[in-house]
Amino acid sequence: MSKGFLALACSTLLVFPVLGWGGNESLFKQGQATSWAVYMRELGGMRAICSAIAYKTTPEMTHLLSAGHCFIGSDLKRTDFLVTQDHRSFANARVEASGLIVRTGRNLTSRDLDDYSGDDWAVIKAEIGNKPVIPLGSAESLLIGEDLIMIGLPFGVDFLAVQGIVGSKDVSLSQLVWNHYYGANIYIAGGNSGTGVISTKQKALVGIITAGPGAQSSLAIFLPLHKIPTDKLRLSD
């Protein structure tokens, strides 16, 4: 990726402990039950690349939300990927829709976000059903300073629960894909891309982590949920 800006997925063999639940124990447990790891099959084997969160389930399948940039540059018609909650039991998955669009004249397999327009989200269909889900909330109702929690995979290892606050509802980033997304004062690192951002007030999902400055940071940029077209979420299916 260009500009050295975003905290994207990377993997390591370290193990991170889950932080204490604090005053939001039940909500952290709900968030943990709905959080997933995204593994991509590559030449060297499977690698944890991003995080995801479940928002809809049926007896046959579960829909997850993640970041669109987790899948750019891959031929997903021939390169499959898996999702898991315990790094041992895996389910096949595929991208149903993405908000990223390759710019005219750019390479379809490019991994450079400068070659894309649109918004950084992806809807994933996992071939496993009857899983816990988180309700969808309203990012537009968030207030500066409001508490947020999230549970994702920093550095692509184990699930880590963190808490922070809304820092901005209009992060200006020039022409980058994440221009005018929301900002949060909350710890992230590479691998947190696609992590669900949960409002403690609404007890619902309000956004998806998309970027942050450097390999790890206390500043997170997240896509507000209203940037995803309702019809792409397939809520009425």
Image (cartoon, grey):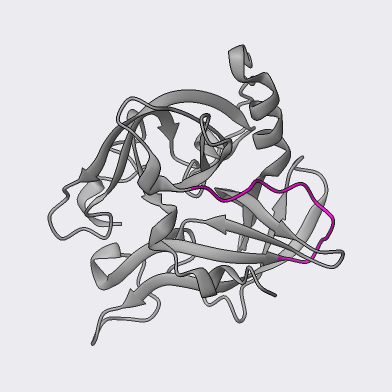
In this picture, is 142 found above or below 50? above
Which of 142 and 79 lies nearest the eye of the viewer?
142
Most common secondary structure along the magenta stretch? loop
Residue 166 sits in quarter: top left
Q: Residue furthest bottom?
A: 105
Where is residue 40 shown, x and y percent of the image? 61, 59
Question: Horizontal placement of 77 versus 59: left or right?
Answer: left
The residue positioned 39% from the left and 51% from the top of the image is: 224
Q: How many marks?
A: 0
Where is residue 144 shown, x and y percent of the image? 30, 30
Q: Residue furthest left?
A: 174
For the magenta stretch, what is the residue range? 126-137
Which of 9 and 98 lies nearest the eye of the viewer?
98
The residue positioned 77% from the left and 40% from the top of the image is: 86
The residue positioned 44% from the left and 54% from the top of the image is: 225
**Residue 137 visible, this angle:** yes
In this picture, is 233 found above or below 21? below
Pick the quarter of the image with the C terminus.
bottom right
Where is residue 176 shown, x and y percent of the image? 21, 58
Question: Horizontal placement of 117 versus 51: left or right?
Answer: left
In this picture, is 52 found above or below 31? below
Is 211 included in the stretch rendered in magenta?
no
Residue 151 sits in quarter: top right
Pick the quarter of the image with the N terminus.
bottom left
**Residue 8 visible, this angle:** no
Residue 118 sits in quarter: bottom left
Which of 135 and 105 lies nearest the eye of the viewer?
135
